[in-house]
C-alpha cells in the first residue's frame, strides 16, 4: 500500500544541468541546452512558476523549447506564456512536433529518449535525458525509494500502468528517477513490478 503523499522537490539544481521548478504540488524541470533551456512540462500556477524562475535567475525568454510528458493542466500551464516555442510530446492538441515511442530527440544539445507510457493518459511519455536521468511524469509514485502506481483515481488504467512501470524499470544505466509529484531517488525499488 502506498500513501501517495505528493512531495515535489524544492526549486533548485537536481543534478548536472537539470533544475527542478517547484509549483506547489507538482514539479516541472529545466535542462540547460546549448543556447537556452529545454523545459520539461510547465506546472499549473504561472505566478508561482515566474517567481521560482526568478529565484533561479532564469528569464522566461531563456526557455527555447518544451517537452511535455502529457497534457494534464498541472503540466502545461507555462505554455500560455510560451506561445512561440517548439512543443514536443505525444499530445496532438499541444505538440508542434508529435513524438513516437522509442524516438530519440536531440533538442538544443539535450538528448531525450521517449517512452510511451499510456496507463496514466494515452498521450503520456516518460523521458530519459542524456541516457542517465529518467523523468517519469505521472507514470509512477515514490514512497521513499519504493516505486508504486500513480494515484489510481487519476489513471486511465492501473494494469496498463503496471506494464509501463515494468518497461521503464528495464532501461539500463539510469542514475536517477525523477517524478513530477513525488520527488526523486537514486535507488528505485521496482520490486512490486518484476
Ligand atoms: Zn500531474
Image (cartoon, grey):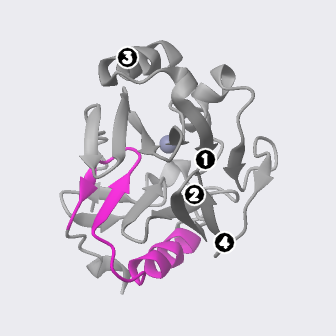
Please provide percent x and percent y for residue 76: 61, 34
Check the image and report above or below for 146 versus 74. below
* Depth check, front residue: 46 or 54: 54
Give the mark, 2 or 4, whose residue is nearer the N terminus. 4
What is the crowding at mark 1: few (fewer than 14 residues within 10 Å), some, or many (at least 20)? many
* Depth check, front residue: 189 or 4: 189
What is the crowding at mark 2: few (fewer than 14 residues within 10 Å), some, or many (at least 20)? many
Q: From the image, which quarter does the N terminus lie in?
A: bottom left
Can you identify the residue that label 1 sits on?
68
- Confirm or deny contact between disc 3 and disc 2 (CB under 8 A): no
Q: Which residue does the image show at 52% across and 37% down from the upper left?
A: 36
- Confirm or deny contact between disc 2 and disc 1 (CB under 8 A): no
What is the crowding at mark 3: few (fewer than 14 residues within 10 Å), some, or many (at least 20)? few
- Per the image, label 4 sits on a secondary structure element best described as loop
* Depth check, front residue: 142 or 28: 28
Residue 167, magenta (yes or no): yes
Q: Which residue does the image show at 36% across and 21% down from the upper left?
A: 52
Residue 54: image tag: 3
Residue 155, magenta (yes or no): no
Q: Nearer the viewer, mark 4 or mark 1?
A: 4
Q: Nearer the viewer, mark 3 or mark 2?
A: 3
Give the mark, 3 or 2, whose residue is nearer the N terminus. 3
Please provide percent x and percent y for residue 180: 41, 46
**Alpha carbon distance from label 3 to label 2:** 32 Å
Q: Which residue is at the far bottom? A: 194
Mark 1 and ligand 1: say if the CB distance to the nearest ligand atom is below 8 Å. Answer: no
Can you identify the residue that label 4 sits on?
103
Residue 8 horizontal side relative to residue 44, left or right:
left
Magenta-tinted stretch: 159-186
Check the image and report above or below for 89 versus 174. above
Amino acid at each position: 500500500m502506498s500513501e501517495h503523499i505528493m512531495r515535489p522537490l524544492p526549486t533548485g539544481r537536481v543534478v548536472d544541468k537539470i533544475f527542478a521548478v517547484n509549483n506547489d504540488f507538482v514539479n516541472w524541470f529545466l535542462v540547460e541546452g546549448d543556447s537556452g533551456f529545454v523545459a520539461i512540462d510547465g506546472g499549473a500556477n504561472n505566478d508561482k512558476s515566474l517567481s521560482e524562475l526568478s529565484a533561479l535567475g532564469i528569464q522566461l525568454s531563456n526557455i527555447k523549447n518544451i517537452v511535455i510528458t502529457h497534457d494534464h493542466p498541472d503540466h502545461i500551464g507555462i505554455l500560455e506564456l510560451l506561445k512561440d516555442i517548439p512543443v514536443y510530446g505525444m499530445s496532438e492538441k499541444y505538440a508542434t512536433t508529435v513524438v513516437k515511442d522509442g524516438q530519440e530527440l536531440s533538442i538544443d544539445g539535450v538528448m531525450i529518449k521517449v517512452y510511451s507510457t499510456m496507463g496514466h493518459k494515452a498521450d503520456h511519455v516518460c523521458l530519459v535525458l542524456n541516457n542517465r536521468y529518467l523523468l517519469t511524469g505521472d507514470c509512477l509514485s515514490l514512497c521513499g525509494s519504493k516505486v508504486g502506481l500513480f494515484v489510481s483515481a487519476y489513471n486511465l488504467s492501473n494494469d496498463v500502468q503496471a506494464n509501463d512501470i515494468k518497461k521503464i524499470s528495464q532501461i539500463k544505466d539510469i542514475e536517477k528517477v525523477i517524478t513530477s509529484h513525488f520527488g526523486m531517488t537514486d535507488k528505485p525499488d521496482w520490486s512490486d513490478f518484476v
